[in-house]
Image (cartoon, grey):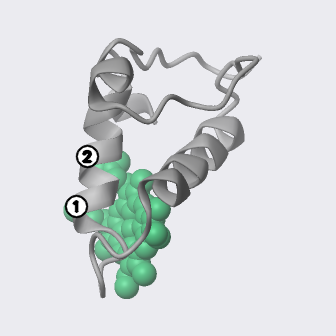
């Protein structure tokens, strides 16, 4: 996640949704990609919100990834 510091969450979504899985890119539904990204964020100790990640590109562009080192 460190290399994504400062990037909008949309950028990570875009890379994953257009290049993953490597043997069948774009094959998952938007919500499935978002759920996987949510899981990756949680594994990286990113703060959680009270709602699901929004699905629109506009909303994802407003969320900025902020890397923080583990305590
Ligand atoms: C839907 C399932 C998958 C998800 C959500 C996923 C997610 C990701 C993410 C988040 C990255 C790191 C991107 C970055 O930080 O730049 C990545 C990289 C990578 N993934 Fe996947 N992945 C999936 C399936 C797969 C599969 C099935 C393969 C192999 C057949 C694969 C091969 C790779 C490779 C080789 C990289 C490194 C690519 C690079 O650095 O350019 N992924 N993946």
Depth check: give the residue in front, 11 or 45. Answer: 11
Depth check: give the residue in front, 23 or 59. Answer: 59
Near mark 1 (Cα within 10 A), the count class, few <14, some 14-19 or many ≥20, is some
How far from the left and from the top, in percent, is residue 56?
35, 31
How far from the left and from the top, in percent, is residue 66?
46, 14
Vertical position of residue 13 compared to residue 23: above or below: above
Q: Residue at x 42, y 70 (%)?
A: 28
Asked where in the image residue 17 lies, by quadrant, the reply is: bottom left
Q: Residue at x 22, y 61 (%)?
A: 18
Q: Is residue 59 left or right of residue 36?
A: left
Depth check: give the residue in front, 59 or 13. Answer: 59
How far from the left and from the top, in percent, is residue 55?
44, 36
**Is disc 1 placed on a helix, strand or loop?**
helix
Tag 1 near tag 2, CB within 8 Å: yes
Q: Which residue corresponds to mark 2?
A: 14
Q: Which residue corresponds to mark 1?
A: 18
Task: Locate the C terminus by quadrant.
Answer: top right
**Is disc 2 placed on a helix, strand or loop?**
helix
Mark 1–mark 2 Cα distance, whole angstroms, equals: 6 Å
Q: Residue at x 50, y 28 (%)?
A: 54
Mark number, residue 53: none
Vertical position of residue 53 compared to residue 6: above or below: below
């Amino acid at each position: 996640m460190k290399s994504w510091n400062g990037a909008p969450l949309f950028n990570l979504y875009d890379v994953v949704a257009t290049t993953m899985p490597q043997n069948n890119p774009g094959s998952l539904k938007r919500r499935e990609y978002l759920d996987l990204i949510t899981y990756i964020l949680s594994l990286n100790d990113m703060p959680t919100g009270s709602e699901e990640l929004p699905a629109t590109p506009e909303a994802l562009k407003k969320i900025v990834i902020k890397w923080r080192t583990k305590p």
